[in-house]
Image (cartoon, rainbow, N blue to C red):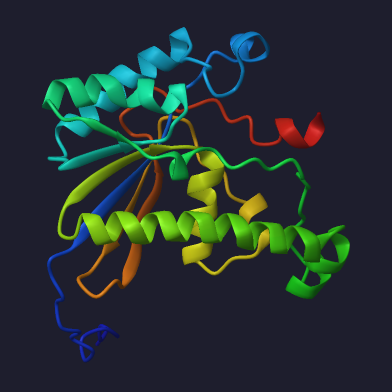
């Protein structure tokens, strides 16, 4: 007879739980990036369509607080939802995109962790850079948790910020960071208990979209 391995643990419930929804902005209009800059780049037509489906999804989630980075595309993604629930968007520049210019193709199968590290040029330097990024994300999340205990918060941010945070929770190095993709318009959920213990509930939920986002996972590596 199968026995549930968790049955004997019966950990005490430490409520209230804080639910954090990490939302990557919808598709931006990259054609305007050189003209107006990355910071002010708005959503594209496709991004505004994604936003309609995302907003509908969020309206069913009973969100208490809304945060967004200082970048236009994150704020534009949040605005219709905030207007519909009559809540103010709290702008927090700690949620801004984190620059990362070093992209590598990492083979996984038939390679040990040590072999992957040896094959990856500048592994030590890049891992230290990732540590800095993860620290930024961790401190931002810690402050959001402190200010919003027991609430549901929506955090409109960016791919590298979300990846830094998730890989930090997973205690992953730069290889783990490079092996993860966060899709535009996706939602990833964290649950934090009263004492600060954290669980990743899910990553990259895009079920609200009528079709999966375009998977351009290796475009950067091929450029």
Residue 124 locus on image (x, y percent) = 79, 66
Q: Would you say residue 175 is visible in this rendering?
A: no
Q: Is residue 191 above or below residue 64?
A: below
The residue positioned 20% from the left and 54% from the top of the image is 148
Residue drawn 77% across and 67% down? 110
Q: Which residue is more in the foreground, 52 or 209? A: 52
Query: In which quadrant of the rendered view does residue 111 lie?
Result: bottom right
Question: In the rendered image, which quarter is residue 86 located in?
Answer: top left
Q: Position of residue 78 (x, y in %)?
A: 31, 26
User: Which of the two residues, 86 or 170, is positioned nearer the viewer here?
Assistant: 86
Nearer-the-camera pick, 192 or 119: 192
Q: Residue at x 31, y 54 (%)?
A: 144
- The quarter of the rendered structure image containing the C terminus is top right
Instruction: Please give left or right for residue 132 compared with residue 81 in the image.
Output: right
Instruction: Give the side of residue 160 with respect to residue 67, left or right.
Output: right
Residue most extreme to the bottom? 8
x, y (%) of residue 43?
46, 15
| Horizontal arrangement in the rendering, residue 106 relative to residue 208 (left or right) | right
Task: Residue at 85%, 59% (x, y): give it.
Answer: 122
Q: How many marks?
A: 0
Find residue 213 and report its horizontal and vertical position in percent. 48, 27
In this view, 132 is above or below 35: below
Looking at this view, is 71 or 110 the one in front?
71
Q: Quadrant of the N terminus?
A: bottom left
From where the camera sits, is residue 128 visible? yes
């Amino acid at each position: 007879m199968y026995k549930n391995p968790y049955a004997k643990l019966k950990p005490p419930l430490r409520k209230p739980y804080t639910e954090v929804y990490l939302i990557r902005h919808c598709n931006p209009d990259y054609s305007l990036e050189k003209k107006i800059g990355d910071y002010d780049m708005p959503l594209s037509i496709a991004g505004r369509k994604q936003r309609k489906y995302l907003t509908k999804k969020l309206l069913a989630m009973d969100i208490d607080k809304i945060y967004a980075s200082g970048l236009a595309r994150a704020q534009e993604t949040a605005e219709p939802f905030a207007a519909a629930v009559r809540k103010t968007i709290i702008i927090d520049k700690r949620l801004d995109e984190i620059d990362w210019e070093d992209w590598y193709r990492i083979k996984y199968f038939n390679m040990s962790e040590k072999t992957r590290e040896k094959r990856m040029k500048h592994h030590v330097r890049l891992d230290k850079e990732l540590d800095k990024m993860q620290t930024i994300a961790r401190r931002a999340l810690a402050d959001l948790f402190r200010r919003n205990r027991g609430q549901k918060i929506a955090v409109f941010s960016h791919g590298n910020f979300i990846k830094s945070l998730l890989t930090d929770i997973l205690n992953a190095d730069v290889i783990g960071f490079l092996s993860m993709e966060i899709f535009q318009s996706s939602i990833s959920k964290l649950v934090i208990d009263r004492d600060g213990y954290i669980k990743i509930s899910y990553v990259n939920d895009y079920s609200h979209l009528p079709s999966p986002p375009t998977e351009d996972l290796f475009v950067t590596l091929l450029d």
